[in-house]
Amino acid sequence: MGRDVPSVSFTHEDRRRYREKVKLSLEVLAEMLRGSRFEFERPLMGLEIELNLVDARGEPAMKNAEVLAAIAEPDWATELGQFNVEINVPPQVLSGDGSRQLEESVRRRLNRGQERAARVGGQLMLVGILPTLRESDVSEGTLSANPRYKLLNEQIFAARGEDLHLYIEGVDLLDTYADSITPEAACTSVQLHLQVSPEKFADHWNAAQVIAGPQVAVAANSPFLFGRELWRETRISLFEQATDTRPEELKAQGVRPRVWFGERWITSVFDLFEENVRYFPALLPLCEEEDPRQVLEDGGVPGLHELRLHNGTVYRWNRPVYDVAGGVPHLRVENRVLPAGPTVADIAANAAFYYGLMRVLPSAERPVWSRMSFAAAEDNLRNAARYGLDARLYWPGLGEVPAAELILRRLLPLAYHGLDLWEVDPVQRDRLLGIIERRCVTGRTGADWQVRTARALGGDHEALRRMTLRYLEHMHTNEPVHLWSL
């Protein structure tokens, strides 16, 4: 969904033609998979980081157009809300000191962005949900100006036929309605990409599903929404609800949600694209002129534009990506469960933990997913989002154990081994995975720090505002959150 779209209205003919093109693209993808026409995996880290904009008081700043104009760099882009921006970080090799170079590259970009944003009264903030955000900040009027967001908003509400009901029961209760998809803009995340061969894609996707719960537990950073303390990673539940095209009746009938964990382990990347086509009607039925079958028969590489656009409107927590680079097609797993922040160092540690596990788990002789149900993996994600490191998660051979114990006893040793297999510099390996370890030992995640600080300051909006300003001070030091003072 990152592409720009024109401001249009869709006819029945548009939808019919789009459905035919999507199905044709799916058939062409199947032919390409049979023909092994893909570039094999390379150990590259790819990152997308979404950020919030705040003013000098720590309140949301509706200035993304001004900030992006001031930054004026091609790797920066709009996001859904006027208080969001996104940075796309070019892929970096994992081996050697690649993780350090990636971290330094991100810091340089963010520092340069912050310097220019400050010229127009904005500050960049790495956090899962902006603590000072109010309900009045997420109306249709605060959508970004890009026509694709207005069009997406129209199509989701046309499918629903009614307002969004946001209901999250946590420490406090959120029970409210929204007349636009702008509440989704409250969710700011880090997306990790890993290029994978078609033959190994299913194992990598299954592994990513397995570790989604532990990832969220140790990285939780979204405890507040609209002034209420909810889940440790409220972003998970909010994102699921804020893009839901189903009224209550369709939910009762078992229609799948567009923000989706999935419902089964897979045996091929084709399974995921086929599910997308089978279960989800088009939101943006825009067709390109390309005939993908003719391109393939002529020896070229089809863009599969309609299939990719459709895939971009199904928001799996681990999404399959088909892309073409340098005239060669490839596949990626896009991991979407992580919140932004608290610091670049914390983001790099979360990435190292993920990439280390993804080097080991997919090639295990007896894969983890062959010993646990798919529902257990989904329950892990839900429990981790609600309780963070206090969650109890299921793992084969251990049963239900505290998240911190699972990570320390079972997953961190695997991540260390995985980074060794990636040939990551041991100094960088130890520094980054040491951050994960200390979070588990201290119990200090971004969510934990936010909650403790806000409660100590009084728990009201003024406390959230003051906490946000303290957060920003710590964020700019790049000291990992487990070292932040309360």
Image (spheres, rainbow, N blue to C red):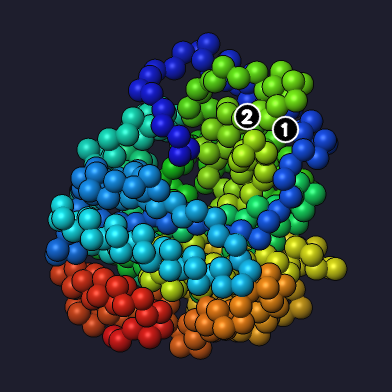
* Residue linked to disc 2: 304
Question: Residue 76: percent from the left, percent from the top?
Answer: 36, 48
Instruction: Please say if 20 is above or below 239.
Output: above
Who is closer to the viewer here, 281 or 144? 144
Q: Residues within 10 Å of mark 2 (few under 14, many from 20)?
A: many
Where is residue 106, by image quadrant?
Answer: bottom left
SS for dot 1: helix
Q: Are marks 1 and 2 in contact (CB under 8 Å)?
A: yes
362 vs 171, left or right, is: right
The residue that appears at 67% across and 65% down in the rendered structure is: 358
Instruction: Please say if 447 is above or below 146.
Output: below
Tell me if residue 480 can be seen.
yes
222 vs 431, left or right, is: left
SS for dot 2: loop
Q: Amino acid at mark 2?
A: Leu
Q: Residue furthest right?
A: 365
Question: Which numbered marker is on residue 29?
Answer: 1
Question: Residue 423: percent from the left, percent from the top?
Answer: 68, 73
Q: Residues within 10 Å of mark 1 (few under 14, many from 20)?
A: many
Instruction: Please say if 370 is above or below 418.
Output: above
Question: Which numbered marker is on residue 111?
Answer: none
The residue that appears at 55% across and 79% down in the rendered structure is: 428
